[in-house]
Image (cartoon, rainbow, N blue to C red):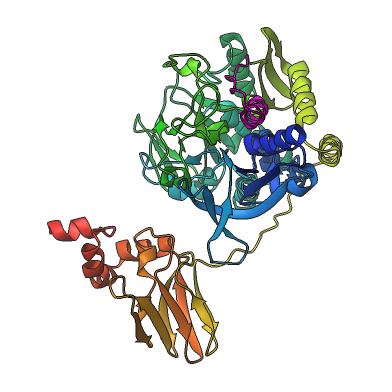
């Protein structure tokens, strides 16, 4: 018996741990996650503000999931008929099949900014550890730039910081970011506190819509007192790398835009073909995916009804860590019940309240109807999340970070990590394999020098057709179509130099250079795909 859990967030990690404790060693439990660590997301704003070191806000999954098989891999698809998860793992581009008897989907959600031009390209996000790390580096970079520039417009844009969305994530992010700025200004003598502008943009008429009005009002007053401007009943129309335009046509000169809105299903979840409602997987009250006996879902990616005939927003479980932890326990209990020949039970849980940190050692808390504000709420916030942190080592490291943060200044060191360039040269020796049929599509290739051979199997005759490629030839076009698998095998027959680019860079070139677009238009039209910018050419 094999149970496979997809995702290593609150839902996935706690499900795997509960399954192991409940079912014992007789049942194999495997967790698949793109990273080998668990991110404690409520602490991301503090990571972004520098009060917690990034490595201290995560826990190695192999440490906290004793007895669970952890596979670091990217989920590509699920073959429900054959009961197998197809993944790409490590440096391999070959697909690997992971069989299951029961499957638990806890992959969370992605983002979709398509309705607001420019937001995807220029906004920072707050969903991953890398997002938080990038925010801190970016804020410090703006302070460094404002310190030395002699251009008033440039300085104004660098010192204007904007956060979109005033839910828990947005409010905590803007509060922590303001504290980072305030505590850093003494080291930038050419920046006056009066020159710093921090704005929180929210489409609703109030912030923290999930909390009681009294606490939301307190939070709003605290943020304003702390120097944060609230722009309520304001939406985002578009943005550039230097400006944000609201739905009221107000133009804000800013080089910092943090978006905490726009949740959307991940592409891998869409590829599964499972029923969706409001962009989330439709599940029964017992957390089974609708229409599937052996597939379960929880967390942000699942729409979980809390009562029969649920239709209103409050009738479904909110996508919070508090609920995900309880959902995980119910999934484990229900899978154990099914394996034991019993019927699964519906998920039932009543929220114990909500907490939010506002920065400057202030917070708000609603605990079973008991309301706290200010410093006591901030202490409760920290105590609650410290208790929820998995692993003693993580708890100790976070406490140490908090203690040091109270005793000294925030670090202004900028450490940058290396990323593989999206467009790069790759060298191959004669006989090297570039990729095999069935491998993951990971680039578009152009031959610069040398010679390669491409083998393709004729689907009708089964015959292998071979094509020789030389300088100027290209291959890997299926990547442009959104394909995830290769249909050919390519190898070097001479020492060769190849230019590789990712799909996004290819589409950017197609949109920006007419000659490039025209060259590939026949191929794309043959496959029914329109290149960016192609419509305007046809109209002309």
For the point 25% across and 58% down, which residue is it?
530
Q: In the rendered view of the protein, which quadrant contains the C terminus?
A: bottom left
- Image height of 375 relative to 116, above or below: above
Using the image as rendered, state which of residue 108 and residue 327 is in the foreground: 327
Q: Does the image show residue 150? A: no
Q: Give the range drawn in magenta.
A: 326-350
Q: Is residue 90 left or right of residue 456?
A: right
Q: Which residue appears farthest toward the front when viewing the image?
A: 341
x, y percentage for residue 169? Answer: 59, 31
Viewer-side residue, 67 vs 39: 67
- Residue 133 can be seen in this image: yes
**200 relative to 439, above or below:** above
Q: Is 199 a magenta residue?
A: no
The answer to whether 36 is drawn above or below residue 229 in the figure is below
- The residue at the far left in this view is 540
The percent position of residue 474, horizontal first and vertical second, equals: 36, 78
Residue 465 in the image: state x and y as whole percent: 33, 82
């Amino acid at each position: 018996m094999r149970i496979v859990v997809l995702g290593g967030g609150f839902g996935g990690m706690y499900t795997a741990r509960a399954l192991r404790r409940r079912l014992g060693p007789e049942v194999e439990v495997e967790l698949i996650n793109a990273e080998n660590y668990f991110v404690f997301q409520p602490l991301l704003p503090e990571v972004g503000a520098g009060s917690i070191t990034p490595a201290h806000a995560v826990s190695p999954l192999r440490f906290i999931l004793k007895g669970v098989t952890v596979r670091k891999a990217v989920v590509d698809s699920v073959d429900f008929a054959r009961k197998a998860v197809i993944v790409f793992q490590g440096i391999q581009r070959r697909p690997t099949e992971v069989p299951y008897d029961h499957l638990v989907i806890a992959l969370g959600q992605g983002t979709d900014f398509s309705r607001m031009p420019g937001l995807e390209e220029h906004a920072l996000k707050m969903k991953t550890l890398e997002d938080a790390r990038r925010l801190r580096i970016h804020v410090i970079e703006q302070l460094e730039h404002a310190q030395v520039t002699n251009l008033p417009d440039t300085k104004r844009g660098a010192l204007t910081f904007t956060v979109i969305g005033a839910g828990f994530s947005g409010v905590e992010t803007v509060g922590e970011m303001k504290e980072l700025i305030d505590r850093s200004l003494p080291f930038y003598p050419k920046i006056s506190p009066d020159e710093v502008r921090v704005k929180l943009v929210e489409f609703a008429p109030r912030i923290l819509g999930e909390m009681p009005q009294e606490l939301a009002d307190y939070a709003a007053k605290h943020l304003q007192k702390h120097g944060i401007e609230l722009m309520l009943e304001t939406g985002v129309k578009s943005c550039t790398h230097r400006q944000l335009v609201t739905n009221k046509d107000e133009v804000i000169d800013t080089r910092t835009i943090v978006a905490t809105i726009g949740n959307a299903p991940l592409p891998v979840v869409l590829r599964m073909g499972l029923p969706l409602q409001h962009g989330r997987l439709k599940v029964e009250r017992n957390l089974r995916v609708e229409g599937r006996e052996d597939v379960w879902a929880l967390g942000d990616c699942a729409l979980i009804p809390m009562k029969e005939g649920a239709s209103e927003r409050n009738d479904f479980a909110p996508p919070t860590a508090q609920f995900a932890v309880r959902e995980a326990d119910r999934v484990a209990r229900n899978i154990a019940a099914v394996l034991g020949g019993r019927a699964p039970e519906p998920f039932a849980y009543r929220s114990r309240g909500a907490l939010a940190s506002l920065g400057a050692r202030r917070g708000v808390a609603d605990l079973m109807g008991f309301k706290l504000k200010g410093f006591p709420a901030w202490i409760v916030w920290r105590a609650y999340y410290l208790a929820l942190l998995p692993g003693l080592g993580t708890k100790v490291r976070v406490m140490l970070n908090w203690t040091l943060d109270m005793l000294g200044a925030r670090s202004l060191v900028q450490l940058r990590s290396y990323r593989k360039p999206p467009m790069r040269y790759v060298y191959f020796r004669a006989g090297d394999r570039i990729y095999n049929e069935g491998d993951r599509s990971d680039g578009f290739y152009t031959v610069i020098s040398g010679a390669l051979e491409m083998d393709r199997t004729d689907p009708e005759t089964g015959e292998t057709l071979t094509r020789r490629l030389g300088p100027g030839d290209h291959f890997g076009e299926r990547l442009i179509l959104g394909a995830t698998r290769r249909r050919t095998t390519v190898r070097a027959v001479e020492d060769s130099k190849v230019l590789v680019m990712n799909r996004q860079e290819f589409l950017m070139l197609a949109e920006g250079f007419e000659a490039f677009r025209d060259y590939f238009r026949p191929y794309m039209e043959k496959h029914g795909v329109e290149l960016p910018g192609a419509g305007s050419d046809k109209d002309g």
